[in-house]
Image (cartoon, rainbow, N blue to C red):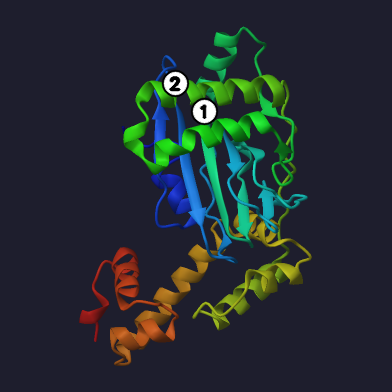
């Protein structure tokens, strides 16, 4: 089945981990719920990649303590707290959630698109819902969700021990429980994005130009504007029309062209511009310019 939502490979890329095993429940008519396990044993791995905005939710249950983390919704930094094992958090994918992984983490995430949510409310005979009424940065203690996740873990550890009926039953049970006990009828409106002044844009672009090797922390840019890192990223994109990383990558390629014409080898250019692998530089250059930098003189 082709992945078209925030689970499996897409969620693996979001959190930049090596593996993200997933299971898909097939019991709901014209809808699916997918479960993904994400594990990262390293601390301070930085901001997660943005998840594509869609009318869907992630219900995440922690499998290990998370002492420290940051969370941004619609570019606004949210209140966060220590997340002990078993904490359940509900993320609305209409609000562009981005996490800053300060501590190592391991969690199970249920991907629940709107079609599945509607199927659950119809099946359970309960009113329609539109959101979950908890701050995901703090989460909620729900022993039922925790124990249902513990029951489904063998399906990830030893796939041969769990058949499709088992996966379907536990997945739908967990989602139905969450909807009954934590969902609400109305979603809070997102805050409006800020924009940057001309001076703030100029200073940011100047700093980026001076640090094309990547030796610049996002906080150094955002602090000057009195914003959180995610607020700054959103404001930059809203003002300039492109992301900070995209703008910097374009500058790197332009700098690379000049260095190559001056006689630098591709490996030397890659090192000067902060690429860890020459192959990464070569790939970026070909994608943006259409030619192999090793042939430029």
Residue lying at the far top in this picture: please name it.
Answer: 125
Quadrant the C terminus occupies: bottom left
Relative image position of residue 155 (x, y in whole percent): 41, 36
Pointer 2 with pointer 1, Cβ within 8 A: yes
Write the residue at 65% across / 72% down. 204
CA gap between label 2 and label 1 equals 8 Å
- The answer to whether 64 appears left or right of 287 in the picture is right
Provide the secondary structure element on which disc 1 rests. Answer: strand
Nearer-the-camera pick, 239 or 222: 222
Query: Which numbered circle lies on residue 131?
Result: none
Q: Is residue 260 above or below residue 59?
A: below
Determine which quarter of the picture holds residue 285: bottom left
**Secondary structure under badge 2?**
loop
* Residue positioned 35% across, 68% down in the render: 284
Disc 2 marks which residue?
A: 31
Residue occupying the point 71% across, 56% down:
195
For disc 1, the neighbor class at 10 Å (few under 14, some 14 to 19, many from 20) is many
Q: Which label was assigned to residue 113?
A: 1
Q: Please report whichever mark, 2 or 1, sits nearer to the chain's N-terminal start.
A: 2
Image coords of residue 288 (percent x, y):
34, 65
The answer to whether 72 is drawn above or below residue 211 in the figure is above
Q: Residue furthest left?
A: 295
Q: Report the front residue among 72 and 205.
A: 72
Q: Quadrant of residue 225 in the image?
A: bottom right
Looking at the rendered image, the quarter that the N terminus falls into is top left
Q: Is residue 41 left or right of residue 65?
A: left
Where residue 60 sits: x, y (%)? 59, 40
Label 2 Cα neighbours within 10 Å, binned few <14 / some 14-19 / many ≥20: some
- Asked if residue 145 can be seen in this view, the reply is yes
- Residue 263: % across, % down: 29, 92
């Amino acid at each position: 089945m082709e992945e078209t939502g925030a689970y499996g490979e897409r969620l693996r890329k979001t959190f930049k981990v090596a593996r993200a095993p997933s299971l898909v429940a097939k019991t709901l008519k014209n809808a699916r719920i997918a479960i993904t396990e994400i594990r990262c044993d390293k601390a301070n791995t930085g901001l997660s990649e943005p998840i594509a905005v869609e009318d869907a939710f992630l219900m995440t249950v922690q499998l290990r303590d998370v002492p420290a983390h940051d969370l941004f919704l619609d570019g606004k930094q949210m209140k966060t707290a220590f997340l002990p094992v078993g904490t359940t958090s509900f993320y609305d994918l209409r609000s562009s959630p981005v996490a800053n992984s300060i501590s190592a983490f391991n969690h199970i995430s249920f991907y629940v698109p709107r079609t599945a949510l509607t199927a659950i409310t119809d099946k359970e005979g309960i009113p329609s819902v539109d959101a979950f009424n908890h701050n995901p940065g703090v989460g909620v203690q729900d022993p039922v969700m925790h124990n249902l996740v513990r029951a489904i873990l063998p399906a990830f550890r030893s796939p041969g021990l769990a058949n499709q009926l088992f996966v379907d039953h536990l997945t739908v049970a967990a989602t139905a429980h969450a909807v009954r006990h934590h969902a609400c009828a109305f979603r809070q409106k997102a805050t409006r994005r800020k924009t940057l002044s001309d001076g703030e844009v100029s200073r940011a672009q100047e700093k980026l130009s001076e640090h094309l090797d990547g030796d610049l922390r996002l906080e150094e840019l955002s602090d000057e504007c009195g914003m959180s890192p995610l607020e700054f990223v959103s404001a930059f994109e809203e003002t300039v029309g492109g992301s900070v990383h995209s703008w910097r990558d374009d500058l790197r390629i332009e700098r690379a062209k000049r260095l190559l014409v001056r006689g630098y080898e591709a490996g030397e250019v890659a090192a000067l511009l902060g690429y860890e692998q020459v192959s990464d530089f070569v790939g970026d250059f070909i994608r943006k310019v259409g030619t192999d930098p090793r042939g430029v003189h």
